[in-house]
C-alpha cells in the first residue's frame, strides 16, 4: 500500500507551500519503473486520471507538455515542464500554467533500487493555493492524494507486467477521404448529441459541456452480435482539427481506451482518421471470449469491434459533409 506524508513548509510572504509525498514498493527493476514514469505520452492510456497529454516542446532531457486530467471529478488542464534524468532515474516537474485553485505546483518522481533488486517509487508535490485559501488548499491536497495513489498503483501494476505490455497494448487507425468541408466533418463528429439519430450503432447518448471544448459523454453502442455496451468518455477538442477522448468506463475486455478524431486537408477535400489505443484486460479474456481464447484473440476481437464502429461513423460523417457540399 502506498504511504503518504503531508506537511506545510515554513510560511513566507507568499501563499504557504504545502508538501506531500507518496511512496510505494514495486516488484520490478527500477529501469522498468523509470520507463513508465518517463513516457508521459502514454499516461492517458496507463493512468486513470489522465485524459490527454500534448507535447508543446521536446528535447532528449526536457519536455514542455499540456495535460488534461480529472481532479476530484472535474476535468482540469495545465502546462508543465519536465526534466528527465535517466541516469539517476528521476523526473522533476513544474507547472508553468496552473489551473485554480492551484497557484503553483512542482514535484519529483524518485526511483531507487531496493536490496532485493526491486524498486521504491516516491512521488512528491509542493504546491501553493490561490490566495492561500484553506478551501483551495484542502481541494488540492485531496486531488493530489487521490491522483498520486492512483498513478503509483498504475505504475506498480504496469512495471510488474512490463514484459507483457507490448502484447496487451495496441494502437490502430482507420482513414477515409471526404469530398467535402472539414468544418462539416468536424461538426458531425463534435455534435455527438445527434449521434443516436445519425449513427445506427448508437442507441443512447448523454452529453455535458460545461466548459467549451470539453465534453463528458455517456453512450450505449450496439455491436454486430446485438449486444449493447455502455461507455463513458471525456472528449477534448483541440481547434477544429482534432478531438481527443478517453473512455472512463470501458467494456470488459479493456482496462483502458483512448482515441482521436483528426482532420487533414487533402486536395479539395479532407482526410479523416480515427485512431484507437487500447489495453487488453487479460483476466477477462476467458470470460468474454471463451476458455480457450488468448490475448491475441482479444486483440483481434477488440480491433474489429472498434474499427467497425469508427469506420461506420467516418462513412456517415462523409455522407453528411458531401451532401452539404452538394
Image (cartoon, grey):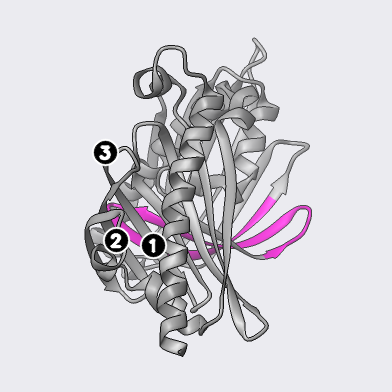
Quadrant in the picture for the C terminus: bottom left
Secondary structure category for the residue under label 2: strand
Q: Is residue 308 visible?
A: yes
Q: Earlier in the sequence, mark 2 or mark 3?
A: 2
Q: Magenta segment, which residues?
A: 57-83
Q: CA distance from mark 1 to mark 2?
A: 6 Å
Quadrant including the N terminus:
top left
Q: Nearer the viewer, residue 265 or 278?
A: 265
Query: Residue 326 in magenta?
Result: no
Residue under numbered circle 1: 235
Q: Nearer the viewer, mark 2 or mark 3?
A: 3
User: Does residue 143 appear left or right of residue 268 in this picture?
Assistant: left
Cα distance in 3D space between marks 1 and 3: 24 Å
Taking 284 as reference, is 291 above or below it? Answer: above
Q: In the displayed image of the protein, which residue is found farthest to the top? A: 116
Nearer the camera: disc 1 or disc 3: 3
Write the residue at 53% across / 46% down: 277
Position of residue 127 in the picture relative to residue 168 (left or right): left
Tell me, yes or no, if residue 103 can be seen here. no
Residue hosting label 2? 216
Q: Count residues near mark 1 (Cα–Cα under 10 Å), then give few for <14, some for 14-19, many for 20+.
A: many
For mark 3, what is the residue? 227
Amino acid at each position: 500500500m502506498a504511504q503518504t506524508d503531508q506537511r506545510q513548509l515554513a510560511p513566507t510572504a507568499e501563499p504557504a507551500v504545502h508538501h506531500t509525498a507518496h511512496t510505494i514498493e514495486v516488484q520490478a527493476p527500477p529501469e522498468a519503473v523509470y520507463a513508465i514514469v518517463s513516457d508521459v505520452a502514454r499516461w492517458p492510456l496507463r493512468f486513470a486520471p489522465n485524459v490527454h497529454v500534448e507535447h508543446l516542446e521536446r528535447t532528449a532531457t526536457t519536455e514542455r507538455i499540456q495535460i488534461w486530467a480529472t481532479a476530484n471529478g472535474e476535468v482540469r488542464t495545465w502546462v508543465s515542464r519536465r526534466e528527465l534524468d535517466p541516469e539517476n532515474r528521476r523526473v522533476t516537474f513544474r507547472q508553468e500554467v496552473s489551473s485554480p485553485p492551484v497557484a503553483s505546483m512542482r514535484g519529483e518522481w524518485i526511483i531507487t533500487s531496493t536490496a532485493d533488486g526491486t524498486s521504491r517509487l516516491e512521488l512528491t508535490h509542493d504546491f501553493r493555493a490561490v490566495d492561500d485559501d484553506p478551501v483551495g488548499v484542502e481541494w488540492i491536497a485531496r486531488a493530489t492524494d487521490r491522483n498520486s495513489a492512483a498513478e503509483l498503483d498504475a505504475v506498480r501494476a504496469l512495471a510488474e507486467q512490463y514484459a507483457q505490455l507490448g502484447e496487451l497494448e495496441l494502437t490502430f487507425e482507420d482513414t477515409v477521404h471526404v469530398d467535402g468541408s472539414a468544418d462539416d466533418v468536424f461538426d458531425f463528429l463534435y455534435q455527438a448529441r445527434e449521434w443516436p439519430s445519425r449513427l445506427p450503432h448508437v442507441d443512447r447518448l448523454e452529453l455535458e459541456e460545461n466548459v467549451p471544448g470539453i465534453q463528458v459523454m455517456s453512450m450505449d453502442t450496439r455491436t454486430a452480435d446485438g449486444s449493447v455496451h455502455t461507455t463513458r468518455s471525456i472528449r477534448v477538442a483541440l481547434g477544429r482539427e482534432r478531438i481527443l477522448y478517453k473512455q472512463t468506463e470501458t467494456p470488459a475486455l479493456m482496462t483502458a481506451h483512448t482515441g482521436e478524431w483528426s482532420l487533414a486537408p487533402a486536395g479539395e477535400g479532407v482526410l479523416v482518421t480515427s485512431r484507437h489505443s487500447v489495453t487488453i484486460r487479460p483476466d477477462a479474456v476467458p470470460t468474454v471470449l471463451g476458455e480457450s481464447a488468448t490475448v491475441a484473440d482479444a486483440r483481434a476481437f477488440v480491433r474489429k469491434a472498434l474499427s467497425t464502429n469508427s469506420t461506420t461513423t467516418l462513412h456517415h460523417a462523409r455522407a453528411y459533409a458531401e451532401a452539404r457540399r452538394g
